Image: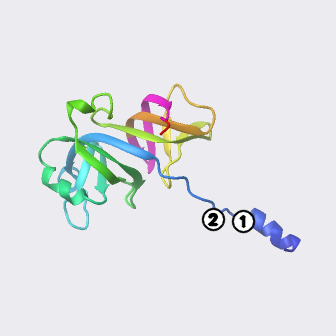
Amino acid sequence: MTSIALLLALTAPAADAPKPMPAKVTISAELVCAHCSFGIESEGGCCPCLKLDDKTPVIIKGKGSDDLLKSRFAKKTFVVDGTLSMNKEKLLVLDMTAVRERTDADKGKAPDAGQVKITGTAGIKDGKLILQNADVPVTVESKTAPTEEKPITVTGKVTVKDGKVSLEASSLEPAEKK
């Protein structure tokens, strides 16, 4: 390789740099219809959605998500596991891997209703704690934060502003080893 080619290779953007792995996300919230409750248009009209609060929907996608449509008006709280992304309209989307109706047995195990638990690798960017999560990094607002890159679990309230996801932490702890 010539010195010019080597220089170009070293200064080129890292387009092939690996993306961070998606964080593991668990959300407890009332199941609603994205179209009926938030006015969100989707290809088929109605689609299942978790209502974190009056302004924060999380659209549910993935295998079995269509089965949830039957319960969208039941005013029930569900615990949904999956990976978090953002669609082209800058809305949160949870690609569901597991779902169950929230019961008393979930107390202390799953987040409280309207809360999100994210387990991923923490990092520091621009002086802020960031949970690495594929294409959608999550800024964590917390009084205590790790100062090194390591796996953590953060529970709290999620907000989206200007296409950026923020998590106001109510708890932050090292991720459990499995």
Q: Is residue 43 left or right of residue 137?
A: left
The quarter in which the N terminus is drawn is bottom right
In reply to whether residue 173 is colored magenta, the answer given is yes
Q: Disc 2 designates what residue? A: 15
Question: Is any atom of residue 54 visible in this view?
Answer: no
Which secondary structure, mark 1?
A: loop
Q: Decide: few, some or many residues near mark 2? Use Cα within 10 Å; few <14, some 14-19, many ≥20.
A: few
Q: Residue 95 falls in which quadrant of the image?
A: bottom left
Using the image as rendered, state which of residue 172 and residue 50 is in the foreground: 172
Q: Main secondary structure of the magenta part?
A: strand
User: Looking at this view, is 78 or 88 the one in front?
Assistant: 78
Image: 61 above or below 115: below
Residue 148 at x, y percent in the picture: 63, 35
Question: Residue at horizontal 35%, vertical 42%?
Answer: 26
Of the residues shown, which amino acid type is indicated by label 2? Ala
Q: Quadrant of residue 14?
A: bottom right
Q: Residue 57's spot in the image, x, y percent? A: 29, 48
Display colour scheme:
rainbow
Q: Is residue 11 magenta?
A: no
Horizontally, residue 97 falls left or right of residue 43, namely: right
Q: Residue furthest top?
A: 143
Q: CA distance from mark 1 to mark 2?
A: 8 Å
Query: Where is mark 1, residue-wise?
Result: 12
Q: Which type of secondary structure does the marked residue at label 2 adopt?
A: loop
Tell me where the magenta segment starts and ends, as one range.
159-176
Out of 146 and 124, give the one closest to the viewer. Answer: 146
Q: Residue at x 19, y 63 (%)?
A: 45
Q: Is residue 72 left or right of residue 169?
A: left
User: Tag 1: residue type?
Assistant: Ala
Going 53% across and 26% down the picture, which residue do you hit? 144
Q: Are marks 1 and 2 in contact (CB under 8 Å)?
A: yes
